[in-house]
Amino acid sequence: MTSRYREIAEEIRERISSGAYARGKRLPPQKSLADEFGVSQPVVQRAVMALRTEGLVRIERGTGTVVHEIKPIVRNATARYTKTAREQGQSRGAFATEVRSLGHVPHSKLVKLGPATPPAEIAQIFQFGRDDIAAIRHRHMTADETPVQIATSYVPWTIAKDTPITQEDTGPGGTYSRLEDLGHRVTRFTERIRTRPPSEEEADFLRLGEDQQVYSVLHIAYTEDGTPVEVTQHVMPTFQWVLEYEWAAD
Amino acid sequence: MTSRYREIAEEIRERISSGAYARGKRLPPQKSLADEFGVSQPVVQRAVMALRTEGLVRIERGTGTVVHEIKPIVRNATARYTKTAREQGQSRGAFATEVRSLGHVPHSKLVKLGPATPPAEIAQIFQFGRDDIAAIRHRHMTADETPVQIATSYVPWTIAKDTPITQEDTGPGGTYSRLEDLGHRVTRFTERIRTRPPSEEEADFLRLGEDQQVYSVLHIAYTEDGTPVEVTQHVMPTFQWVLEYEWAAD
DNA sequence: TCTTATTTGTTCGTATGTATT
DNA sequence: GAATACATACGAACAAATAAG
């Protein structure tokens, strides 16, 4: 039952973990691996595919196969939404803290900003009608130049209109602090996690294949009376993240 | 860039979602699909492999390819550890509730029970020395005969010894209620989520391929003074579960 | 019950295609 | 355009599960 391509995959796995193939560097070309193992190149191709599915390597067609360098980043959901976390690091927020704690340099780029019609799933949460719109913030995040997350935030336009929430810089403490200023103090959060293959756009930025998976974390912030005031969709390669939660019993 | 096997995978995906290939039933043999699409049979094989990675189908060698029937089960971590959830359904616990709410019949089988040395990762949480052991409960869970989860619980033997925790039936409210009886009231939980390929044993019971992924949820229960008293490792196919969390701000 | 044939999925080598530098 | 590196397709041979005898 154990096939040649599995053995080769296992051997390469070991060479990576032993450091023989260094993180961030290239694997030997599939042709030379094929010669070394005495198999044809497509057999090596298949072994490498398996490693990519696991998130161990990234394949760059025409160039080579790169061993992934970033260790999983820990995202502590409970800690990241405290006021302290949001304000620290020159108002750079929780993501910066998470990435820095692993010794990497975080970067966040606002790709899209402005009012728009949210996708159906989001609209439903806000109980939107046909014409309702939301303030949208769409960001691409990297750690040491490696893309690691896409986040898209939504706040009902009736709330966000003419406030810093629609600006590039939302100010100290971010969106949640502004919502509080506006009398919408957030008291409760929910998150819903699932995994799925990346969309084409996501695969493009995150440099993923369709055989890989991303976490889709749907984060909802509620005010005291149970009204959802902010929703964020986080999309992250599963192999690059560890998700943590913490809560009190009963 | 779009290859034949991707097109075929997409076509089969559509036939599944349109109901042309019904859930729980078999796909046509790869040979006949190959004839229909005018390609060789290994090309179909590759398309089917892609669908398996996504969790859409299960391949039974020598028999055929089955379209998965179970919709994702929602695991609300916050709700499942309340006293009410643990006691309801004739002390069948949270898992039974989760599965029943989707209209399926849950079943849990205790595969292993008794004192043993826990794996290093668990031992470290309890700050165990070389000789310390734990009461272990290893369970296989199914929904409508479909395997959906493996859970392994650990309680330090010094606590669990000579208590119902080491019995097959831990009584109403389960382990947590017994811990409370013993003066170890649990007040806080943490969970750490990651995804990885299944181990051989896991793949075997959960009927997964090595190209698929499982959630590994490490659940830790702490008492008031911060001592971990119970740890459970949940292993679940990612495509079969949605994970939910809920917590209060600050 | 054992053996064999058939069906169905799996693996590999050769040939060829496509992307990147 | 040439060289390099990964990607795809096909045919043939293989292996597992089941059913028939």
Image (tube, coloured by chain):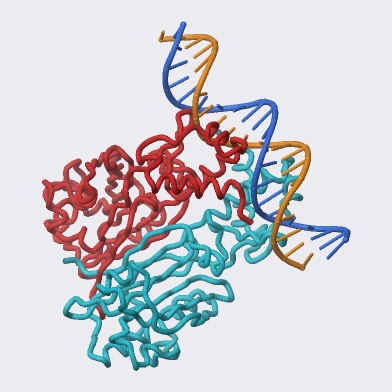
Chain colours: A cyan, B red, C orange, D blue
Q: Position of residue B92 (x, y in %)?
A: 16, 47
Q: Which residue is nearer to you in this view: A88 or C12?
A: C12
Please identify the quarter of the rendering in which residue A117 is found.
bottom left
Q: Position of residue A165 (x, y in %)?
A: 37, 88
- Which residue is rendered at x = 39% and y = 55% of the image? B215
Q: Position of residue B227 (x, y in %)?
A: 26, 65
- Which residue is rendered at x = 39% and y = 47% of the image? B18
Pick the quarter of the image with the C terminus of chain A.
bottom left
Pick the quarter of the image with the N terminus of chain A.
top right
Answer left or right for B34 relative to B177.
right
**In this rendering, is residue A246 above or below B35?**
below
Please identify the quarter of the rendering in which residue A43 is found.
top right
Q: Which residue is nearer to you in this view: B124 or B74?
A: B74
Q: Position of residue D5 (x, y in %)?
A: 73, 57
Q: Which residue is nearer to you in this view: A129 or B200?
A: A129
- Which residue is rendered at x = 54% and y = 58% of the image? A55
**In this rendering, is residue A249 above or below D18?**
below
